[in-house]
Amino acid sequence: MIAESVSGSSRRQLLLTRMWKERYLYLLLFPGLVYFIVYKYLPMAGNMMAFQDYSAFQGFWDSEWVGLKHFERIFQDKEVLRVLWNTLYLSLLQIAFAFPVPIVLAVMLNEVRREWFKRLIQSIVYLPHFISWVVVIGMVTVFLQSEGLVNKLLHVLFGIGPVAFLQEPGWFMPLVVLEVIWKESGWGTILFLAALAAVDPSQYEAAVIDGANRWRQIWHITLPAIRSTIVILLILRLGSVLDSGFEQIFLMLNPFNKSVGDVLDTYVYVKGLTESDYSFATAVGLFKSLVGLLLIIGANRLAKRFGEEGVF
């Protein structure tokens, strides 16, 4: 026991010595650490409201505890089930159509041999990421309104009358997916291009000697090089399957498309801040987080079963 105590003391001493030697690195880490503690971890204490009939006048400790009452309400309320379906459907559409686009774009950019042209295209496709959703939705509204550019072109080229893109419920989800593709696809290529930069060029040279054309090189060299990156990003994307993006959806909503456009994020906002139903809104948010956690764990185990590294 004395030996174990001495060993533990020496390990602590080594750790403290190393931390002092690298104190400037820890100093750089400190602002980010404070940010996560203040804005990510401390607010988690508010999740106790999901198990209370919270009253702002009584506070956290004096509000009545009701157990799983609000979680039971999630599965009994038809409005919640409708919003949950909208969220799942929209997330599946984004995974099916928006997730593969950065992969395809990264492969295409990797095939460009003129470096200046490649850099130019990268800069162009990166730019939309830095435009706020407020500006993006404003542009979409201007282009797609009844007297907008798109409807004028449809009338001139095909003789089609004004299409109510922004009011018709059937157009809501396709527009959301297209906006995500346009805004985020270029930025999403960064990780894939970084993975492709690590590929040894001699592999392509050997493939050429063996008679492989460009398609064979992409299939047997390029795609396997980014396979682990694809798996990790897909696992992380599944973890946010119930997170559809509040700002974009909220700005796109109107009384005409609310039936298909209302998602969990906007529903929690309305219930929590507009109707002051804090406990139920917290329960819905906590439920969303738990589902995301379970999906990440399940997808990670499935990835490891198929021989991939996974996230953890």
Image (spheres, rainbow, N blue to C red):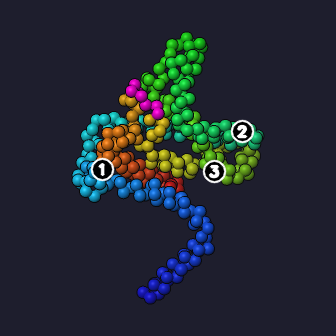
Spot occupied by residue 306 in the image (x, y as percentages of width and height)? 49, 52
Residue occupying the point 41% across, 36% down:
89
Label 3: few (<14), some (14–19) or many (≥20) C-alpha neighbours in 10 Å: some
Residue occupying the point 54% across, 75% down:
15
Circle 1: element type: loop
Label 1: few (<14), some (14–19) or many (≥20) C-alpha neighbours in 10 Å: few
Label 1 belongs to which residue? 56
Quadrant showing the N terminus: bottom left
Q: Amino acid at mark 2?
A: Leu
Instruction: Give the spatial CA distance, label 1 vs label 3.
Output: 50 Å
Q: Furthest residue to the top?
A: 159
| Horizontal relation, residue 114 to residue 24: left or right | right
Label 3 belongs to which residue? 195
Residue occupying the point 52% across, 35% down:
134
Circle 3: element type: helix
Instruction: Give the spatial CA distance, label 1 vs label 2.
Output: 54 Å
Out of 174 and 23, give the one closest to the viewer.
23
Label 2 belongs to which residue? 120
Magenta stretch in the rendered image: 251-257
Q: Amino acid at mark 3?
A: Ala
Residue occupying the point 53% across, 40% down:
99
Above or below, 98 relative to 4? above
Out of 115 and 10, give the one closest to the viewer.
10
Question: Was residue 36 drawn as part of the magenta stretch in this picture?
Answer: no
